[in-house]
Amino acid sequence: MKHFEDMSGEELQGAWLQLLINTPAYRHTDGTFEYKMAAAINFATGLLSPSSREEILQGALDTATEWDRKVKYEGDIQEHVAAGGKYVNIYVLDHDNYGGPEEGGWHYTSGTPMSIGYNHHHDDPDYRYHSEDNVRGTTKVHALDNPRRVCEEIHKAIDSAGTGLERGEYVVKVEDRPAEYWPAVKPHYQ
């Protein structure tokens, strides 16, 4: 496929329309709304200079492509969990997040995904980049494996990696999603 800079205005519009029609969420519709939306964008951008049109269409293509990646990522997570899989996640804890002045000031704990490279599945394509002593923020645990055993392996790996973290400074959790910063939203005093 040509890069957008090598495309004519008509080719850019066609690429945008194809991308829009082939996006997973749109494949399950009759296409009427998507076609009308793409036609309106094509018409509107046709009124602009060629460089402005290319910039707008490239931005739209980039946005739709990123959105499509996120949809596929979420689909992979749901498929893994539906098959009985889990994620073992490691978080570095911060107990000193200032929450607010109520009651003389209060603090809350947050967790930041740890990432220093461990993966216990040797057949995983990115395993070759990590040594046995390293620790990774998320380990995908398949349905036939025991997540608690993986937690213990991770604790041992953290201890042997010389991270300097004590057990109260990090937590290993078995979850249905890869590691994400928490809390997602700053808590409110109640």
Image (cartoon, rainbow, N blue to C red):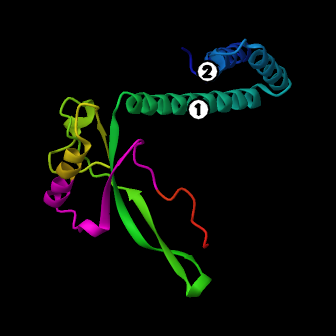
**Residue at x 66% of width, y 33% of height:** 59
Q: Secondary structure at mark 1?
A: helix
**Residue at x 63% of width, y 15% of height:** 27
| 111 vs 84, nearest the viewer | 84
Left or right, residue 101 beside residue 138: right
Task: Give residue 39's quadrant in the image.
Answer: top right
Kind of residue at disc 1: Trp
Q: Secondary structure at mark 2?
A: loop
Residue 116, compared with residue 42, is above or below; it is below
Task: Give residue 10's quadrant in the image.
Answer: top right
Q: Which contiguous range is marked in magenta? A: 155-181
Q: Which mark is residue 67?
A: 1
Left or right, residue 115 beside residue 186: left
Residue 178, compared with residue 44, is above or below; it is below
Q: Is residue 112 magenta?
A: no
> Mark 2 and 1 residues: CB-CB less than 8 Å, in contact?
yes
Q: Earlier in the sequence, mark 2 or mark 1?
A: 2
Q: Tell me, yes or no, if residue 134 can be seen here.
A: no
Q: Which residue is mark 2?
A: 23
Left or right, residue 2 beside residue 28: left
Q: Is residue 156 magenta?
A: yes
| 105 vs 143, nearest the viewer | 143
